[in-house]
Image (cartoon, rainbow, N blue to C red):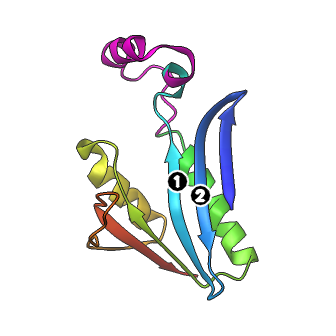
Amino acid sequence: LNFFVSDGDIPIGYAYILLSKSGTMRLSDITIRSDTYFDQHYSWWKRWILRRIHDRLWHYRNNGLGTALLQLVLAEAKQKGVQRIEGSVCAERPEDEDRLLAWYRKMGFTIHPPKEHRLMKPIAELEMTL
């Protein structure tokens, strides 16, 4: 399952979900971008400069969009009879780690130490029983 969030025609977030036959949902990725406007409209060097000058310009995070997106995912999971949700947490920036883990706890997830992974470096594993 895929869920998308946009601001007009600009994509700003998404959630990728994998469903198993055993009643488990894998939250593969959920993201609300902070710099989508720059990514969509400027060359890499201009994005680099603008990110340093305007760190908060066109910032979509911390406005409840991720919470609304995750609530939509949880409602869909319940409708499909999912009994358990799991996932890995990866932060784009180290300074976001504590805030991100606190957000998942607030949303009802149990946080576990990360597992070894070949492709990514998770900071934690998530689990929720519905």
Pick whichever of labels 1 and 2 is earlier in the sequence.
2
Q: In what element is the residue under mark 1?
A: strand
| Foreground of the two, 22 or 104 | 22
Q: Quadrant of residue 26?
A: bottom right
Q: Could you tell me residue 89's position as x and y percent? A: 37, 60
Residue pointed to by mark 1: 30
Q: Residue furthest front?
A: 118
Residue at point 29%, 73% (across, down): 115
Density class for disc 1 (Cα within 10 Å; few <14, some 14-19, many ≥20) is many
Q: Amino acid at mark 2?
A: Tyr
- Crowd rating for badge 2 (residues with CA inside 10 Å; few <14, some 14–19, many 20+): some
103 left or right of 85? left
Residue 56 is inside the magenta segment: yes
Q: Nearer the viewer, mark 1 or mark 2?
A: 2
Per the model, the C-alpha gap separating discs 1 and 2 is 6 Å
Figure check: 16 above or below 48 = below
Q: Amino acid at mark 1?
A: Ile
Residue 50 is a magenta residue? yes
Is residue 50 left or right of 130 when viewed as pictured?
Answer: left
Q: Which residue is mark 2?
A: 16
Which residue is nearer to you in this view: 55 or 16? 16
Residue 44, given in percent of the width and then of the height, sits at 41, 17
Vertical comparison of 73 with 65: above or below: below
| Numbered circle sitting on residue 60 | none
Task: Check contact, mark 1 vs mark 2: CB within 8 A.
Answer: yes
Residue sitting at the far right? 79
Question: What percent of the width, then of the height, locates residue 72?
Answer: 67, 59
At a point 24% along the width and 45% down the height, the residue shown is 94
Which residue occupies 28% across, 58% down? 121
Give the residues drawn in magenta, as a range.
39-61
Q: Residue at x 49, y 20 (%)?
A: 38
* Near-viewer residue (63 or 95): 95
